[in-house]
Image: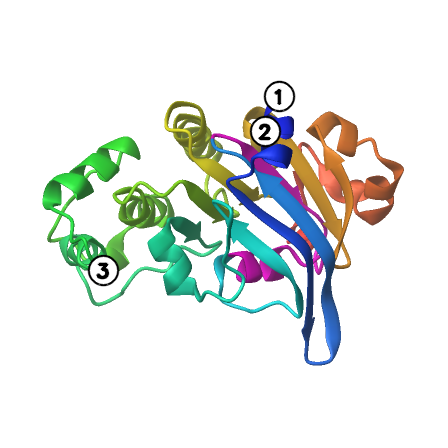
């Protein structure tokens, strides 16, 4: 049985017919997806396609107009962000914002004590080792570079072993060697730790190495889904934004 078949018949996480209106404008129209344990689903699309809005719905920050979101077979559509986080739905953001007035040690302590069961420093050290983050407890989090900010925030997530992570452009602001690090990390999470990952990303070369399937969105709808090489040759995808693909990644207009 393939991973695609697993995600379709026994999804860890899924949404069905998600529609969303904001300010009288239709943002999402009947979006459905499913992902199984250890599977990586990539989401791409041009600017304004609705990718971030979809993540807002999937993570619980915004309630949809209609449709359902399920996690481990349970309807979580009306659960809020923190309630979904406690169930094990993790999320990272395009901009790695850290508490500017806290040290690295204080950020990790806050994450360990965010909710019960409280975790120990050993849990934080395990997460940091996994993402290759060197903990300098007294260093202000505001002084970390982009890569280490991402690693710190991932450490906060991973110490609680989430079965699902929504990643919003994890390669944003990183140089090629740093992207390679995230490639390795995502492989470890999905293939060795069986974490399901849904990732919005514009660096096609990254998705080519890690994504089991890719879903393409345009104007709030899914226009294609399947293996990356197949969807990139779909005429509907070409019409939406393929002309913006340059040297393996999308230009800045396809944010």
Residue at the disc numbered 2: 6
x and y, in percent, of residue 218 in the image: 77, 53
Secondary structure at numbered mark 3: loop
Secondary structure at numbered mark 2: helix
How far, Cα to Cα, is label 3 from label 1?
Answer: 36 Å
Choose the circle earlier in sequence order: 3 or 2. 2
Mark 1 and 2 residues: CB-CB less than 8 Å, in contact?
yes
Q: Residue at x 23, y 60 (%)?
A: 114
The answer to whether residue 207 of the structure is visible from this angle is yes
Q: Could you tell me which quadrant the C terminus lies in?
A: bottom right
The numbered disc on residue 193 is none
Residue at the disc numbered 3: 115
Above or below 47: residue 146:
above
The picture quadrant where one finds residue 49 is bottom right
Residue 134 falls left or right of residue 172: left
x and y, in percent, of residue 112 in the image: 19, 53
Q: How many residues crowd mark 1 within 10 Å: few (<14), some (14–19), many (20+)?
A: few
Outermost residue, bottom side: 23
How far, Cα to Cα, is label 3 from label 2?
Answer: 32 Å
Secondary structure at numbered mark 1: loop
- Relative depth, front residue between 146 and 85: 85
Choose the circle earlier in sequence order: 3 or 1. 1
- Relative depth, front residue between 251 and 239: 239
Q: Residue at x 36, y 47 (%)?
A: 150
Residue 141 falls left or right of residue 81: left
Residue 120 falls left or right of residue 210: left
**Residue range corresponding to the magenta coloring:** 38-58
- Does the magenta portion include 164? no
């Amino acid at each position: 049985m393939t991973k695609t078949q697993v995600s379709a018949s026994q999804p860890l996480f899924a949404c069905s017919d998600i529609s969303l209106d904001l300010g009288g404008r239709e943002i999402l129209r009947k979006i459905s997806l499913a992902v199984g344990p250890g599977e990586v689903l990539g989401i791409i699309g041009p600017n304004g396609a609705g990718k971030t809005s979809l993540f807002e719905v999937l993570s619980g920050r915004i309630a949809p107009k209609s449709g359902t979101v399920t996690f481990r077979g349970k309807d979580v559509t009306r659960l809020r962000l923190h309630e979904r986080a406690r169930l094990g739905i993790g999320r990272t953001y395009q901009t790695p914002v850290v508490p500017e007035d806290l040290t690295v040690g204080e950020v990790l302590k806050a994450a360990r004590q965010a909710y019960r069961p409280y975790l120990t420093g050993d849990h934080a050290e395990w997460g940091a080792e996994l993402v290759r983050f060197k903990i300098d407890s007294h260093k202000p989090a505001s002084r970390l570079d982009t890569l280490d900010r991402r690693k710190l925030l991932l450490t906060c997530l991973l110490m609680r072993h989430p079965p699902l992570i929504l990643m919003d452009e994890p390669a944003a602001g990183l140089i090629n060697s740093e992207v390679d690090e995230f490639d390795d990390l995502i492989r470890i999470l999905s293939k060795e730790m069986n974490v399901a990952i849904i990732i919005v990303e514009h660096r096609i070369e990254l998705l080519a190495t890690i994504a089991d399937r890719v879903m393409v969105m345009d104007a709030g709808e899914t226009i294609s889904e399947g293996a990356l090489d197949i969807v990139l040759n779909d005429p509907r995808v070409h019409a939406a934004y393929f002309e913006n693909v340059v040297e393996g990644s999308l230009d800045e207009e396809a944010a």
